[in-house]
Image (tube, rainbow, N blue to C red):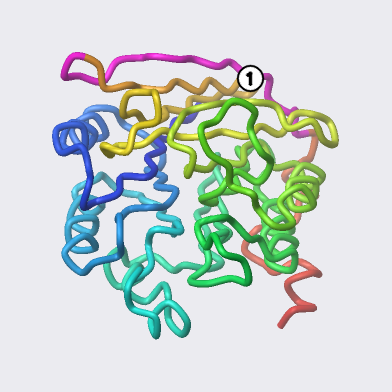
Amino acid sequence: MGRLLQFSDIHFGVEHRRACAAAVDYAHATPSDLILITGDITQKGYPDEFKAAGDWIRAMPEPRFVNVGNHDVPYWDVAARLFYPWKAFERATGHPAHDHQFLAPDLMVRGVTTARGWQARANWSKGVIDLAQTKKAANALRQAPPGALRILACHHPLIEMIGTPMTGDVKRGDAAALIFAEAGVDLIMTGHVHIPFALPIDLADRCSYAIGCGTLSHRERGTPPSFNQVDWDAKTITVTAMAWIDGAFTPHQTWRLNRRQDTRKSATAPNPNQPGPLEKAAV
């Protein structure tokens, strides 16, 4: 019924060049409904890193959806970090840093930014999520066409995953995850921790899942470079981590997830192209 490919944490500047090139080849050889890239396309936000990242993204087949990550800021430009942290990202990718949305009959993706140019704690690499933006995104996803797979894309895992080599430590992450689960979001797809995972979120009906993606950089944390292939039908979502092993991408880990059953009818479902009550109130 549908397929998307998720890439994350390419970290141009320390990218795995052979794996990155092979990933583009794989994407062209494997038709999909969407190429989803969940942040950290650069290592330090240098102009040459953004250029390389932009060229790589444009080499991917369309349609594409790109989220911003905590490394996608000009790390050593204090003024840029404070006043326009995502300007270089938006220029390089052609994608907005906020309120990004993709809509097709069988798939809806909404992006929320969890990275910050700066924040009131020492480690700026950690995540922050705004609950007003969360509610706006959840309301939009709630109105997706009946039967469509509903995905929230952000860089940091909203709920900490046991066994990962680092944390997202997202402020208000648990509250946001509950809002998305109650809105019927199927997948919350993230990067940041550099290892793949697919786990149920123990909230609401437990049919929302946290999906983590590996890295295509040399910043490996105990696992080979990888990306996710997500296939779905009416009843099942299958997540396959494609790992770079012996010079090629091969299936490395697979998770089969029971899909939430959407009982809405097309005739009575809200229009996803019209703002819902929460969005109207925010205007």
Amino acid tagged 1: Leu
The residue at the point 20 percent across, 69 percent down is 47
* Residue 256 x, y percent position in the rendering: 58, 15
Determine which quarter of the picture holds residue 224: top left
Q: Nearer the viewer, residue 60 or 160?
A: 160
Main secondary structure found in the magenta portion: strand
Residue 203 falls left or right of residue 48: right
What residue sits right under mark 1 in the picture?
257
Instruction: Report the span colored magenta.
Output: 246-262
In this orientation, does residue 271 appear? no
* Residue 75 x, y percent position in the rendering: 35, 68
Residue at far right of view: 204
* Residue 131 x, y percent position in the rendering: 74, 64
Does residue 157 lie above or below 275 as drawn?
Answer: above
Determine which quarter of the picture holds residue 87: bottom left
* Residue 248 x, y percent position in the rendering: 20, 19
Q: Nearer the viewer, residue 231 or 113?
A: 113
The residue at the point 71 percent across, 34 percent down is 208
Residue 93 colored in magenta in the image: no
The residue at the point 34 percent across, 28 percent down is 226
The residue at the point 62 percent across, 66 percent down is 121
Q: Nearer the viewer, residue 7 or 263?
A: 7
Residue 148 falls left or right of residue 63: right
As helix, strand or loop, the secondary structure at mark 1 comes to: strand
